[in-house]
Image: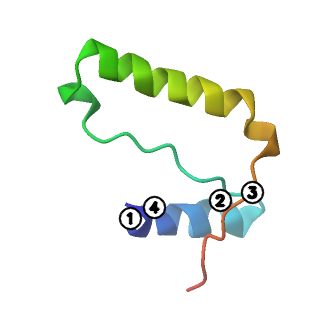
């Protein structure tokens, strides 16, 4: 997944001056049950609550 996102992270975000944070990846949300979806949403809520303290990732070079 990171290989797919790398051109976006590097070429569209980091190149123009944005700090790139790690992506929030959830596989198959359409196939999750309600409990699993709520768990992923809670994980995202917790991340957003402390996102200002996250360190940027290295998007790589070409």
- Numbered marks: total: 4
Cβ atoms at labels 4 and 2 below 8 Å apart: no
62 relative to 53 in the view: left or right = left
Residue at 47% x, 22% y: name it.
41
Where does label 4 land, which residue? 5
Between marks 2 and 3, how big is the CA–CA gap? 5 Å
Q: Which residue is mark 3?
A: 18
Which of discs 4 and 2 lies nearer the camera? The answer is 4
Please report the residue visible at 53 percent of the width from the left and 29 percent of the height from the top. 43
Q: CA distance from mark 1 to mark 3?
A: 18 Å
Name of the residue lying farthest toward the bottom: 62
Q: Which residue shows up at 38% across the image and 64% down it?
A: 4
Mark 2 — residue?
13
Image colouring: rainbow
Secondary structure of the residue carrying tag 4 is helix
Work out whether mark 3 precedes mark 4 in sequence or the reverse, and give the earlier one: 4
Labels 2 and 3 touching (C-beta < 8 A): yes
Relative image position of residue 28 (x, y in whole percent): 24, 37
Q: Is residue 14 left or right of residue 61?
A: right
Q: Secondary structure at mark 2?
A: helix
Residue found at the very far left of the displayed protein: 31
Q: Say whether marks 1 and 3 touch (CB < 8 Å).
A: no
Quarter of the image with the N terminus is: bottom left
Residue 2, by quadrant, is bottom left
Q: Which residue is outermost to the top?
A: 34
Is residue 10 positioned above or below 29 on the image?
below
- Image position of 22 with respect to 47: above or below: below
The one nearer the camera, 30 or 50, is: 50
Secondary structure state at the residue bearing disc 1: helix
Q: Which mark is residue 4?
A: 1
> In the rendered structure, which disc, 2 or 1, sits on the residue that comes first in sequence?
1
């Amino acid at each position: 997944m990171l290989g797919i996102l790398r051109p976006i992270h590097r070429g569209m975000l980091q190149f123009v001056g944005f700090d790139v944070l790690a992506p929030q990846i959830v596989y198959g949300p359409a196939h999750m049950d309600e409990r699993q979806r709520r768990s992923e949403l809670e994980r995202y809520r917790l991340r957003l609550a402390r996102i200002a303290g996250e360190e940027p990732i290295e998007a790589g070079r070409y």
